Structure formats: C-alpha cells, structure tokens
Image (tube, rainbow, N blue to C red):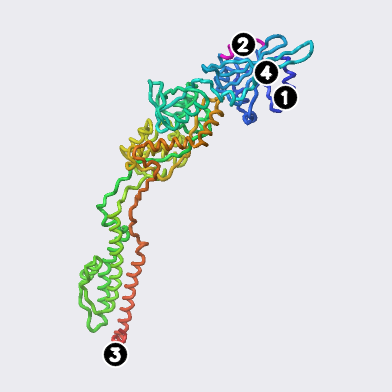
C-alpha cells in the first residue's frame, strides 16, 4: 500500500464501518473470504478499491479470474500511477466491472470504465478526468459517463453481440438441427422460443454449441463438471437454456436466473396388462369365505344327524334313519340351488332347513352378482402410482428404475443419504441408465421399467407414441424449477431475469407449452389416465357376517326347539298326556 494513502484509508475506515483494508497477499483465500463474507454478501453493491503497484494489481485480477470471483455486485476501482491498462484488459473477463484512474500528469488523472464490445472482448472507454490546480488549490472533475455504470443500462442493449449457448436435442423444450458435431441451429421448442424472444429484446444473436455427451451434467465427486453445466462453468459458452433444473450443487459452479418454468417428476410405466379370468369363478369370495362355506356344508350333515340321534331317545316314532353323507349331500344341493330331497316332520330339522335356505339364498345372490361384475369389468395388473409402489415392486424383482444419466432426476436418487430415494437407488442397476427421454420411453416399452422423468417431456412423448401404451403415476414428486445457467458472476443476470419475468407474466411461456402439446398428433396429452387395478372387490367375511349370523341363529333356534321338544316328551312320558300336541 502506498504510504501516502494510509491516512486516507484510516479516515475512510473511521467514517464507514463496512470498510475493510487489506495488504496485498499471494494467498487468494483471504481475498475470496472477503468477497464472499456474509457482511459484504448482503450488500447491494460492494466497492473494491485497489492501491497497489502494477504487478500486484495484475495478480489480484488474475486470481479473480482463476477463482471465478467475478460478481455483478462487485465494482473495482483501480488507481494507476503508470498506464498498464492494456495488460490488465488481457486478464479481465466479462463479469469484472472496473473503473480505472490512470495518472496523466502530476496533478491529473483520466477515468476509464470497462465494457464488452461487439466482438465479446473486454474494452475500455473514457469516463472523465480529474485535475487539481495547485496554484488555485481547486479540484475540477469532468465526468462524461457514470463511473459505476448501471448494469441494466449497460446490458439493456447488447449491441448486436453474438453469444454462445450450450444445448442438447431435447424436444419439447429445445429441438435442434445439427450443423456438425459441435454446432446446431434452433428448430422449435419452449426454450427455443424463450431464447429467441430474449435475444430480440436485448439485441443479441446466438450460436448453439452441442454438448458432446448430450447430458445436462453438474459437479462430480472427482471435481469435474460435466454436461451443459460444465460448458457454462468453464465459460465455453455464455449460458445454457434447455429444461435445466436449478439444484444446490449446480449453483456452486454457475449462476442461475430465477425459475421461469415449474413442474414435477413422474414415473411412467408400460400400461398394466389385463389379468386372466381363468380363476374368475373363485374371485367373488375371499379364501376365508370359501373355507367357511366348505366348513358349513361339511358340518351341516353331522349337525342334522346329531339332532336325529337326540330325537331317537325321546320320540315314540323315531325319525327316519338318514345316513350322514345324505344329510351333507342334500345340504350341498341346497347351496347350489338343486333342492333338498330330505323330508322331515320334525321341527328341529325344519328350522335348520329354513335358515339354511335363507343362508344359501344370500350366498347365491351375492356370488352371482359379483361373478357377473367380475366377468363384465376387466381387471388389470397393479400399476405403479407412487415411489412407494415402485420400491415395493423393485424389492419383489418385478420393476426396476430407469433414469437419464447426469440429470437432476438421477441426482435426487444418487445423492440421497436416507429415505425412500436412497432405498430405491440401492436397488438401481446402472445398466438401466438411458441417454435421453426418448431412450427412457423406449425402455419402458421393452419391459418392466419405471422411468422417472419430468412430467411434460414424458407425457408429450407418451402421447406421440400412443397414450394407451403407457401409464403415468398418479402421484408426482420432486417439484423443480428450470432456469438459465449463466457463467459465474454474469453481469447480465438481472437483465435476463427481468426479460424472463416479462415473458412469464405475459403468458407466453404457457402459450408455447400449449403449442407443443397441441402439435402432437392425436392430442389427448394432459388427460389423467385412470385404471381401476382392482376390479370389483371380492366379498369378504365383513360383507357376509349378517348371513353367517342368520345361519347361527337358525342352528340356535333348532337347538332350543330340540331342547323344548325333549322336555315335552319327558313330561308326556310321565303324565301320559300328549303335551307335544298342545305345544306345537
């Protein structure tokens, strides 16, 4: 630091509490900590004043470039005793807003501000001058343009510059026509319309650079940055716009605009197949009901036989000796509406038959109605309607997950440390990566795959291929917003955000979305598909509890009648009177 400036720095520090004075250091972490400190980060604008010699000043900006410390909220002021602005311009990148005070004479300085010219090179333009008249002791300042230019004014018109954007072929957001391996022309799509509108409004043209692997990408564990995000982070392009989800990890290497498109992720599977009706005859009742019906038929014979044995003990004319198997067979005949060939003059048997007929009537009516519905209404395989359904199916080895490689839909599973996302990822087979959405849709048609992808791109492709072939889960997950991925510290971020907000509020993005949906042959996109995977529900014991109660009531009534008949016979044998005739 120049010795003569020490008093001025100390005076500024006393007057303003947010002034920080640093000596030059080859250690870049100190400057980075200052630029990213919470106290300064919250400020609308941070002014950095450099009073250093030539070599140290050039080192400062070299570190800014290497550490990606450019920021639209930082403005640099550099005092030059000697003019080395040309060397400095060779170091500066777009994103560093600099004002130079170059010494012109012993008592005069010239002011310059940086800007980016039509060739995308950082240049300087005169902003004014400073002169001290020693004889008069007066200072004259002549400013012809702002020393701290407003970025909205500076980037409200790009002056016909040509910017570069990374892209992959990704209809309905950005369909491209490749020119060669590296370059492409825009064809159609939501984001293509967005970019064309912004370019027209801000007066720039653009070139599309194809991402070689066709991936969205992001920071990797090994420190590399892949995909379109990597191209923007390395400043190979100025920005990327192509259904790019804003994520925390990506925001560490690029600057995102505010989201201009919101949607969620769905799971698409092949349409559930219709189940065979080979076992439909058994479907009206649950297994427990069938078991109870069989048990009721089997026990009805011994019960009737038991009543006959009891009646033999007290009746003068015992009931006909009907074999046990005939009792059981005739009760079965009643169950299948073939009639009962057992005839009896005895009330205990009659009550059992009466309530057995009522029991069989209800059973038959319910069975017939439910079987008709089962045969008339198709029943399908259980579909995948949620992440829980997918996880349960993956554990059974029925379905498996498929995702597009290096996308946010992969990252939410891959980076999860707990919960259902991690449980699903633990069962994921890396052979089921797909390159793009079209590959995911094709994989779904090839077998038992649940393809996790954003709703619009998935639904519109399913409609194009034939909506009846696919099933989209009723529950969506992972709400996400799409933004433009800009170079770190891009000074035109707020200008782009304002343009995107205007497009959103005008309803143009929604209109372009509808246009892409309506362009699909056959239409039908956006309609919720509902498949009743269960068909008519089987009748359970809960439904039949009243019927079994009637049967139990009949047996109880018959037992009570048997008791009183036995009691009456005992009285008759003692008194010689036929009380049975009176009672019955």
Circles 1 and 2: CB atoms closer than 8 Å: no
Q: Quadrant of residue 49?
A: top right
Q: Is residue 370 visible?
A: yes
Residue 9, image x and y in percent? 72, 20
**Marks 4,2: beta carbons within 8 A:** no
Separation of residues labelled 4 and 3 (CA atoms): 137 Å
Query: Disc 4 and disc 1: Cα gap in Å?
Result: 26 Å
User: In this rendering, would 419 be left or right of 30?
Assistant: left
Q: Element under label 4?
A: strand
Q: Mark 1 or mark 3: which comes first in sequence?
A: 1
Placement of 414 over or under 103, stated as above or below? below
Q: Which mark is residue 84?
A: 2
The residue under the point 68% across, 22% down is 21
Dividing the picture into quarters, in which one does residue 286 lie? Answer: bottom left
Q: Which residue is mark 1?
A: 13
Residue 247 in percent (x, y) is at 50, 33
């Amino acid at each position: 630091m120049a010795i003569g400036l020490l008093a001025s720095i100390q005076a500024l520090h006393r007057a303003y509490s947010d002034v920080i004075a640093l000596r030059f250091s080859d250690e870049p972490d100190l400057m980075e900590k200052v630029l990213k400190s919470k106290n300064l980060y919250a400020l609308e604008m941070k002014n950095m004043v450099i009073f250093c010699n030539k070599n140290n000043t050039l080192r400062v900006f070299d570190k800014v470039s290497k550490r990606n410390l450019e920021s639209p909220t930082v403005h640099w002021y550099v005092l030059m005793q000697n003019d080395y602005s040309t060397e400095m311009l060779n170091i500066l990148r777009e994103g560093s807003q600099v004002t130079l005070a170059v010494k012109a004479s012993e008592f005069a300085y010239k002011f310059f501000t940086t800007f980016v010219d039509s060739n995308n090179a950082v240049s300087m333009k005169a902003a004014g001058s400073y002169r001290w008249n020693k004889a008069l002791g007066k200072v004259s300042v002549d400013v012809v343009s702002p020393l701290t230019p407003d970025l909205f004014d500076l980037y409200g018109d790009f002056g016909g510059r040509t910017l570069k954007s990374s892209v992959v072929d990704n209809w309905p957001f950005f369909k491209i026509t490749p020119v060669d391996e590296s370059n492409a022309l825009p064809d159609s799509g939501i984001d293509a319309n967005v970019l064309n509108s912004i370019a027209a409004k801000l007066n720039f043209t653009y070139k599309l650079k194809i991402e070689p692997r066709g991936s969205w990408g992001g920071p990797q564990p090994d420190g590399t940055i892949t995909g379109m995000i990597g191209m923007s982070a390395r400043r190979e392009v100025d920005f990327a716009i192509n259904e790019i989800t804003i994520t925390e990890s990506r925001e560490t290497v690029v600057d995102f605009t505010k989201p201009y498109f919101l949607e969620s992720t769905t799971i698409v599977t092949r349409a559930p197949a219709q189940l065979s009706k080979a076992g439909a005859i058994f479907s009206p009742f649950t297994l427990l009901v069938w078991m109870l019906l069989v048990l009721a038929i089997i026990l009805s014979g011994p019960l009737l036989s038991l009543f006959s044995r009891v009646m033999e003990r007290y009746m003068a004319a015992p009931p006909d000796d009907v074999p046990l198997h005939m009792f059981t067979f005739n009760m079965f005949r009643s169950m299948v509406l073939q009639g009962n060939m057992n005839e009896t003059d005895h009330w205990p048997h009659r009550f059992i038959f009466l309530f057995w007929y009522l029991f069989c009537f209800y059973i038959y009516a319910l069975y017939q109605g439910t079987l008709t519905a089962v045969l008339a209404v198709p029943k399908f395989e259980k579909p995948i309607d949620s992440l829980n359904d997918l996880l349960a199916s993956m554990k059974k080895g029925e379905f498996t997950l498929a995702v597009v490689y290096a996308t946010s839909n992969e990252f939410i599973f891959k980076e999860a440390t707990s919960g259902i996302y991690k449980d699903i990822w633990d069962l994921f087979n890396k052979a089921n990566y797909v390159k793009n959405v079209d590959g995911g849709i094709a994989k779904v048609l090839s077998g038992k795959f649940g393809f996790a992808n954003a709703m619009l791109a998935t639904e519109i492709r399913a409609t194009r291929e034939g909506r009846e072939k696919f099933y989209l889960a009723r529950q969506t997950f992972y709400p996400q917003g799409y933004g433009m991925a800009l170079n770190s510290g891009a000074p035109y971020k707020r200008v782009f955000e304002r343009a995107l907000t205007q497009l959103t509020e005008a309803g143009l993005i929604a209109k372009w979305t509808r246009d892409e949906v309506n362009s699909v042959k056959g239409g039908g996109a956006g309609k919720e598909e509902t498949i009743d995977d269960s068909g008519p529900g089987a009748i359970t014991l809960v439904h039949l509890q009243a019927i079994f109660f009637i049967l139990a009531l009949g047996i109880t009534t018959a037992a009570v009648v048997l008791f009183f008949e036995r009691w009456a016979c005992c009285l008759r044998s003692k008194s010689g009177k036929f009380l049975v005739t009176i009672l019955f």
